[in-house]
Amino acid sequence: MKDLFTMWKHTRMVVLVALTAAVYAAVLIPLKVAIPIIPGFTEVRPANVIPIICSLMFGPAAAWGSAFGNLAGDIYGGTFGPGSAFGFVGNFLYGYVPYKVWRWLAHRVAVGAPVMNAGRQMVAYVGAVILASGACAFVIAWGVNLLGLVPFRVIGPIIFTNNAAVSLVLGPPLLRILYPRVRRWGLLYEDVMGDGDISRGRLATVGLLLLVLTAMPGIIAGFVIGTQFSESSVNSAMAPVVAAMLLGCALL
């Protein structure tokens, strides 16, 4: 996880945090009121593709940018509240997981750069999107359920579907256009940060396994528990699963 902190010593990475946050918030805010799904909590979000593609280009800068951008969207879009804390964490993971998953795959499967011109890159992209969408949805759904705001069984599947659908449709064409240009401009995170600034991920395989075993299964289990028993049961039953998922993300 050290890359989340060492990146702040690079001016260009700080600029990329601000860029990601500004673009994310700018697209989020107009749709907060225009197309709500659960007013005050979630809405149709074409902006959800931004953390994914920025993660694959800007690395840890996208994690911070996604978190701050979503927070700004809540504040200026009129949906700021107790649940925004979990939105911050969820969107942080949403911008963090894709680049860590892609790095793991690049070192073991040789998927190459995410320019989306090969079948293995598309498969890797789908996997990264599903894991990132699951992590984001799981944290937020568990958090707002814990606060008694929206049931897990309602908001969890909505956030996951919203994130994944938009990113799977819009992400590949945007990466084909943007990634080569960002690479030419020298703004990829690998170009800005030194090797010593990026985590080696000695336990990344363990982290990825934990993420796979908790993110999507957690959403499914929370949905079933919330449907068959009570929303309060979700809080206690899913707490250790959330903790295991966060540990997995930290180990990536």
Image: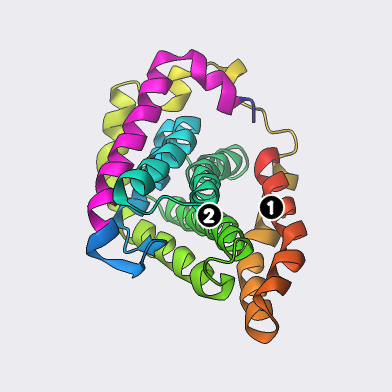
* Residue 74, above or below 212: above
Most common SS among magenta residues: helix
- Outermost residue, bottom direction? 228
Mark 2 or 1, nearer chain start: 2
Q: Residues within 10 Å of mark 2 (few under 14, many from 20)?
A: many
Q: Please state which of residues 88 and 107 is positioned toward the viewer in this rendering.
A: 88
Secondary structure beneath label 1: helix
Q: Would residue 22 appear left or right of 94 to someone viewing this image?
A: left
Distance from disc 2 to disc 1, alpha carbons, whole Å, reads 11 Å
Residue 17 highlighted magenta (yes or no): yes
Which quadrant would residue 114 be assigned to in this image? Answer: top left
Which range of residues does the magenta coloring cover? 3-31
Residue underneath mark 2: 136
Give the residue drawn at x 63%, y 83%: 227
Residue underneath mark 1: 245
Residue 114 highlighted magenta (yes or no): no
* Residue 64, above or below 170: above
Which quadrant would residue 186 be assigned to in this image? Answer: top left
* Residue 147, above or below 11: below
Q: Residues within 10 Å of mark 1 (few under 14, many from 20)?
A: many
Which quadrant would residue 176 be assigned to in this image? Answer: top left
In this picture the colour scheme is rainbow
Please, what is the three-letter code of the amino acid marked with disc 2? Cys
| Image location of residue 35, percent across then percent down | 26, 66
Q: Please state which of residues 122 and 11 is positioned toward the viewer in this rendering.
A: 11
Give the residue drawn at x 53%, y 16%: 194
Q: How many marks?
A: 2
Please, what is the three-letter code of the amino acid marked with disc 1? Met
Secondary structure beneath label 2: helix
Residue 252 visible in the current orientation: no
Q: Please state which of residues 227 and 168 is positioned toward the viewer in this rendering.
A: 227
